[in-house]
C-alpha cells in the first residue's frame, strides 16, 4: 500500500492527515539520516565494523518508519520513532566509548556549531599550518618564486607534525650544524624535523614577524603571541625567543591560558583521595606540602587545589617565582626567580600581614620563611607550599631539614601530597596480553586476579587488505591523553611522634590506609588505562619511588639551621 493510500485510508481522527504532525516525522528523518551519514564516516576511524553498523542502523530506521504508518495513533507511532532513533544512537556511542572513547567528539561538535555562524574565513590548504598576523589576518601562502616561500615551507616542516599530534610545547633550537624541532605531547618529549641553518633561521624570523616581534634582533629575549590554524583547529601560542653564539632559539607554548585548566575532578585523584583532600580544604587550617618531580604537573596540582577553594568568599593570595596563569579572584604576588632568602622572607611576611585565609607559595628556600608559614598555619589559616620531590616522604624530609626542628616542622603540618603525570594508552589501538605470573608477583599484583594487561601497540595497524594504516586517534604515538597518580600522607599525631622520635613512618602510614605512589600507578595498569612500561618511566623521574619511607632523622634543634640548596 503506497503513501497516498495510507493517507486516504487513515481516519480523520487518526492524526496522519495533519501537516503539523507530519513535519516532526520528516525533521526527525532528516536528522536521523545525517547521523547515519556521520556514523558511516566515523566507524572506520573508530575501528568499528562500518558495514555491520550501516545495515543495522538503516534497517532500524526502515522498521521504525514502517511502524509509524501502521500504528493507530500519532503519538504512539512518533514515540516509536524517537525510541528507535535514540536506541541506535545510544548503542553506537556506547560501543564507540568502549572502543576509543568519546573525548574527540567534543571538537567535532564545536566545529559543527561553527558551521552555522555563516562567517566565512580564509581557508588554508588541508594539512597545512595557517599563520595569522598580529592583527588577526590570515597570511597568504607565498608563491613558489616568492622569497618568503622557503621560510613558509620551513614553518610547515616545523609545526605540522607537532600540531597534528596535539603538542603542548614546540622548541626550535640550534643543534650541530642546523636546528632541531623538539616538542612535547602529554608531558612526553619527541624529536621532530631537522632544519639546516638557513631554513631554521628563516622559520623563526617568519614566525617572529607574524607575531610583531623585532626580526632583526636575534639575541635579546622577546615574547609575543601567535595564532595558527591546522585543519580547522585554531590555537594560540606564547612565543619566547632568545639567542647566543650558537644561534637563535624559539619556544612556543600552545594555548598557555588553558595549560593549567585542571580541577580536583580532572587531575586524576581517586574518589578516596578526592574526599580526603576536599575534607582538608573545608578544614582550611595548617600547612599542606604539594610536591612532584620537575615536569610532573606540580603547578597544575597547586592551581587545581587553590581553585577548589571559594575565591569569592575567601581571601586567597599566592607568592610565585614563575606565574604560569592568572587565577580568577586570587591575588598573585610575583617573586623574582633568583630572589634571595631575605627577599623571600620579606614578601612572605608582607603577604601574611594582609591576613589572607589561604596562602600558596610556589617555592620556599629560607628557613625563616618556612617558620613564618608554620606559624601562619597554626593561627587557623591554610598555607600550601610547593616542593620538588619524588615521594611524600622525600618532601617531608626536605621540609624537616629546611625547618631544622622536627617538632616545629610537623606541629601545624596537615598533609603531604606527591604526584606524577603519565600517559594513557590509546583506547583505539592498545594491545591486550597475558602477563607472566612471576612478573606480576614482582609488581605485587595477584596473578589469580590479574590475567590480562594492556600495552602500547608494537606492530602497525592494518586494513582488511593487509595495508598499514594510521591510527587517527593517537597519530601513531600509541598513547593518547594523560592523567595523574598521587600519594597522600596525612600528618596525624602518630606521624608527628614518629618524625620527632626518628622512627620509620611505614607503620603509621599503613595504619591510615595510605597507598604508595607505585601502588596507585599499578592500579591504573590493572584498569587498562596505562602500561607497565609507562609506570616504570615515570617512577624513574627524580629517582625511583621508595618501596617504603625512610626513617626520619633523630630529633635535633640546631640554633642556626643551614638552608638547603635550591631544588
Image: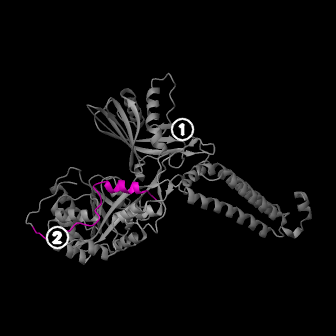
Residue 185 left/right relative to 58: left
Q: Main secondary structure of the magenta part?
A: loop
Front one among 268 and 240: 268
Q: Residues within 10 Å of mark 1 (few under 14, many from 20)?
A: some
Residue 22 left/right relative to 532: right
Identify the secondary structure beneath mark 1.
loop
* Quarter of the rendering containing residue 439: bottom left
Query: Is 550 inside the magenta-drawn segment?
Result: yes
In primary-sequence order, the first of circles 2 and 1 is: 1
Label 2 close to label 1 by CB (< 8 Å): no
Q: CA distance from mark 2 to mark 1?
A: 59 Å
* Quarter of the rendering containing residue 440: bottom left
Q: Residue placed farthest to the left in the image?
A: 559
Q: Position of residue 349 (x, y in %)?
A: 19, 63
Q: Which residues are magenta?
A: 529-557
Q: Quadrant of the N terminus?
A: bottom right
Query: Is 231 inside the magenta-drawn segment?
Result: no
The residue positioned 38% from the left and 33% from the top of the image is 204
From the viewer's perspective, is residue 138 above or below residue 500?
above
| Number of numbered discs visible in the structure rendering | 2
Identify the secondary structure beneath mark 2.
helix
Q: Can residue 156 be seen at all in this image of the molecule?
A: yes
Residue 555 left/right relative to 140: left
Q: Which mark is residue 406?
A: 2
Residue 529 left/right relative to 324: right
Q: Which mark is residue 127?
A: 1
Q: Residues within 10 Å of mark 2 (few under 14, many from 20)?
A: many
The residue positioned 60% from the left and 43% from the top of the image is 466
Amino acid at each position: 500500500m503506497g503513501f497516498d493510500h495510507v493517507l486516504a485510508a487513515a481516519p480523520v481522527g487518526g492524526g496522519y492527515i495533519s501537516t503539523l504532525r507530519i513535519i516532526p516525522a520528516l525533521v526527525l528523518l532528516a536528522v536521523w539520516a545525517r547521523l547515519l551519514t556521520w556514523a558511516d564516516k566515523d566507524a572506520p576511524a573508530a575501528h568499528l565494523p562500518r558495514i555491520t553498523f550501516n545495515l543495522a542502523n538503516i534497517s532500524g530506521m526502515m522498521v521504525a518508519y514502517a511502524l509509524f504508518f501502521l500504528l493507530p495513533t500519532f503519538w504512539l507511532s512518533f514515540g516509536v520513532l524517537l525510541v528507535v532513533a535514540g536506541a541506535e544512537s545510544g548503542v553506537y556511542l556506547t560501543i564507540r566509548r568502549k572502543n576509543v572513547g568519546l573525548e574527540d567528539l567534543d571538537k567535532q561538535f564545536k566545529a559543527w556549531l561553527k558551521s552555522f555562524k555563516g562567517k566565512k574565513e580564509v581557508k588554508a590548504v588541508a594539512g597545512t599550518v595557517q599563520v595569522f598576523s598580529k592583527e588577526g589576518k590570515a597570511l597568504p601562502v607565498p608563491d613558489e618564486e616568492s622569497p618568503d616561500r622557503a621560510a613558509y615551507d620551513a614553518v610547515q616542516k616545523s609545526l605540522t607534525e607537532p600540531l597534528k599530534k596535539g603538542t603542548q610545547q614546540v622548541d626550535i633550537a640550534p643543534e650541530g650544524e642546523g636546528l632541531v624541532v623538539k616538542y612535547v605531547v602529554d608531558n612526553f618529549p619527541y624529536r621532530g624535523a631537522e632544519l639546516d641553518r638557513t631554513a631554521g633561521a628563516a622559520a623563526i624570523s617568519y614566525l617572529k614577524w607574524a607575531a610583531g616581534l623585532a626580526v632583526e634582533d636575534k639575541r635579546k629575549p622577546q615574547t609575543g603571541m601567535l595564532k595558527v590554524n591546522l585543519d580547522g583547529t585554531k590555537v594560540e601560542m606564547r612565543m619566547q625567543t632568545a639567542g647566543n653564539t650558537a644561534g637563535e632559539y624559539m619556544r612556543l607554548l600552545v594555548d598557555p591560558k588553558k595549560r593549567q585548566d585542571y580541577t580536583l575532578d580532572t587531575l586524576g585523584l581517586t574518589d578516596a583521595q578526592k574526599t580526603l583532600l576536599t575534607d582538608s580544604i573545608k578544614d582550611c587550617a595548617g600547612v599542606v606540602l604539594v610536591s612532584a618531580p620537575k615536569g610532573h604537573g606540580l603547578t597544575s596540582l597547586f592551581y587545581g587545589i587553590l581553585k577548589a577553594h571559594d575565591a569569592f568568599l575567601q581571601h586567597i593570595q599566592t607568592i610565585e617565582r614563575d606565574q604560569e596563569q592568572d587565577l580568577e579572584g586570587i591575588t598573585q604576588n610575583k617573586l623574582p626567580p633568583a630572589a634571595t632568602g631575605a627577599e623571600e622572607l620579606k614578601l612572605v611576611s608582607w603577604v601574611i600581614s594582609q591576613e589572607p585565609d589561604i596562602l600558596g607559595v610556589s617555592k620556599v628556600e629560607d628557613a625563616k620563611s618556612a617558620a613564618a608559614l608554620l606559624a601562619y598555619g597554626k593561627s587557623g589559616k591554610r598555607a600550601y607550599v610547593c616542593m620538588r620531590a619524588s615521594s611524600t616522604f622525600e618532601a617531608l624530609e626536605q621540609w624537616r631539614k629546611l625547618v631544622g626542628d622536627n617538632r616545629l616542622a610537623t606541629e601545624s603540618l596537615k598533609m603531604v601530597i606527591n604526584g606524577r603525570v603519565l600517559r594513557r594508552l590509546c583506547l583505539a589501538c592498545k594491545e591486550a596480553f597475558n602477563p607472566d605470573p612471576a612478573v606480576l608477583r614482582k609488581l605485587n599484583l595477584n596473578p589469580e586476579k590479574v590475567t590480562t594487561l594492556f600495552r602500547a601497540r608494537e606492530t602497525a595497524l592494518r586494513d582488511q587488505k593487509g595495508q598499514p594504516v594510521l591510527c587517527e586517534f593517537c597519530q601513531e604515538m600509541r598513547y593518547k591523553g594523560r592523567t595523574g597518580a598521587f600519594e597522600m600522607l596525612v600528618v596525624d599525631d602518630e606521624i608527628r611522634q614518629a618524625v620527632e622520635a626518628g622512627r620509620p613512618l611505614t607503620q603509621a602510614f599503613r595504619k591510615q590506609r595510605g597507598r604508595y605512589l607505585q601502588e596507585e600507578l599499578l592500579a591504573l595498569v590493572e584498569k587498562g588505562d596505562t602500561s607497565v612500561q609507562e609506570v616504570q618511566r615515570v617512577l624513574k623521574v627524580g629517582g625511583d619511588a621508595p618501596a617504603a619511607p625512610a626513617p626520619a632523622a633523630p630529633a635535633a634543634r640546631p640554633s642556626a639551621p643551614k638552608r638547603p640548596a635550591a631544588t
